[in-house]
Amino acid sequence: MRTKASVLAVWVLLAACGKQGTELGEGGSVISGSAGPAGAKNAAKQLVKCDAPVATLALVENPNGYVYGGARGLPESPLPLVRLLAQQSGCFRVMDRNAGLKQVIQEQELKDAGVLRQKGSTVQKGKGYEAQYALTPSLTFSQMDAGREVGGLMGQIPVLRSFVGAAEQVKLKEAQVALMLVDTETTEQVAAATGSVRVTDLGVGGFVLGKLGGAAGAGWANSAEGKVIAAAFLDAHNQLVEQARELQAKELPPGVVTKRKASE
């Protein structure tokens, strides 16, 4: 008991020495930053990129959902994170076929109903860009607490029974995902990739070991299942980029108008 109390006291002391209050940009998952006219900002260091986009892309919700196996309490969809990855990488120009599209349709309906101004309105039919490829993400499996299984196996071996308690403190958090890329003109699946990640929480002061080149560093201790899955999608995206680089670039529609373009 005295040892546990000492460890707890040290942990509280270290926590007190840390930053206090609200910390913008902290927390979250390995997928971070922004994408847009200014390029990819604060993206994950492990993110693989393309020199130029090869086509327009729409991300499609998996009709079977994303809650498999041990997945509990996950966000409804990983699409927002995957869309951010796709735009940050610069391999595709991303077309919205989800909530954003619904809002566009609503704006058009409001205009047709006479609610919106008619003259000078930016809401016009026939201005949307087609998606030349469709990308569907899928969660293959996620397992967040394999340490108990390790302890159970050790308990069956007499010489290792004394180590069962330590083994059960180890939490192996694993996830595997997949990305499927389909040509919307031919319906052919032109590329597919899987991604995986393993986070090993040793249960000692939050000490964590991880795969994916630092994606599971400090802050991944007691990480939510969604963070592990997000890292797996980053891994899958990087695998897919290797294939996307070999695709023949398609004719792209005009790009987003920026301040620089408007002044030229």
Image: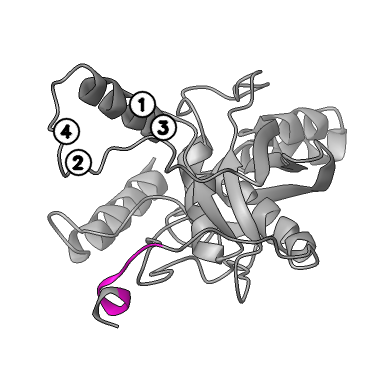
Disc 4 versus disc 3: nearer the observer: 4
Q: Dot 1: within a 10 Å radius of its alpha carbon, few (fewer than 14), some, or many (20 or more) residues? A: few
260 in magenta: yes
Residue annotated with mark 4: 118
Q: In the image, what residue occupies the spot 82% across and 31% down?
A: 153
Q: Which mark is residue 101?
A: 3
User: Sequence order check: which comes first, mark 1 or mark 2?
Assistant: 1
Q: State the extent of the magenta-drawn residues as a range.
A: 256-261
Q: Quadrant of residue 178?
A: top right
Camera-side mark, 3 or 1: 1
- Between tags 1 and 2, which lies in front? 2
- Dot 1 or dot 4: first in sequence order is 1
Q: Is residue 128 magenta?
A: no
> What residue is drawn where x is 66% and y is 54%?
237
Mark 2 sits on what residue?
121
Q: Which residue is tagged 1? A: 105
Q: CA distance from mark 1 to mark 4?
A: 16 Å
Residue reaching furthest to the front: 119
Residue 170 horizontal/vertical position (percent)? 62, 43
Query: Residue at (65%, 61%) from the top-left corner?
Result: 251
**Tag 2, which secondary structure?**
loop
